[in-house]
Image (cartoon, helix red, strand yellow):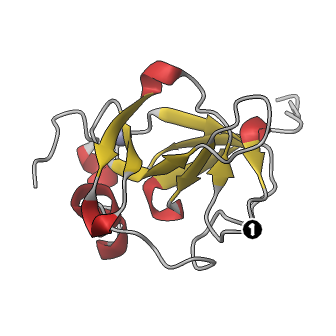
Amino acid sequence: MKISPNINSQKMVTLTAQQKHVLFEKGTEAAFTGKYWDNHDAGMYVCAACDNELFSSDTKFDSGTGWPSFYAPVAKENVMMDSDTTYGMIRTEVMCNRCGGHLGHVFDDGPKPTGQRFCINSASLDFKKKDTQVIKSSP
Ligand SMILES: [Zn+2]
């Protein structure tokens, strides 16, 4: 297991054992157990290890799989993809392009407009809720 220098060391200490397992040992959380599969708030999903922006709530959809699912990353260059042939399946692994942390897999049975389904572990993500309203109080 290689830890990238891009990982935020302050964030590392806040990661749970399960998050480290998913991110750095390519683990998978059990379906319907993660924090975000049923999250419908507007905001940005960032890498749990390095804060890299990965997926926007705008592209999240209900896949019924029990994992947060998106039809596109925020930007193609923010994620890295690689062929994964473990468990006797040919899948495409999705990783964070900044720290190399494992995020999940991408399948080509997603909805329009991309037809892709990024099936991502909640454990690999942190959610930054969009401020719906900023109230500025006078001093
Ligand atoms: Zn990362």
Quadrant including the N terminus: bottom left
- Identified at 46% across, 51% down, the residue is 105
Quadrant including the C terminus: top right
Q: Residues within 10 Å of mark 1 (few under 14, many from 20)?
A: few
Q: Amino acid at mark 1?
A: Gly
Residue 130: tell me if it is visible: no
Q: From this view, report whether residue 95 is shown above or below residue 134.
A: below
Determine the quadrant in which ligand 1 lies: top left
Q: Which residue is mark 1?
A: 64
- Quadrant assignment, res 40: bottom right
Q: Secondary structure at mark 1?
A: loop
- Quadrant assignment, res 134: top right
The front one of 79 and 12 is 79
Q: Picture coordinates of residue 137 (x, y %)?
A: 88, 33
- Identified at 30% across, 66% down, the residue is 88
Looking at this view, name the residue that lies furthest to the left. Answer: 2
How many marks on residues? 1
From the viewer's perspective, is 93 left or right of 74? left
Q: Picture coordinates of residue 110 (x, y %)?
A: 70, 45
Q: Picture coordinates of residue 8 (x, y %)?
A: 29, 41
- Identified at 14% across, 46% down, the residue is 3
From the viewer's perspective, is 28 left or right of 20? right
Residue 119: tell me if it is visible: yes
From the viewer's perspective, is 76 left or right of 7? right
Q: From this view, report whether residue 105 is shown above or below residue 116.
A: below
- Identified at 75% across, 61% down, the residue is 39
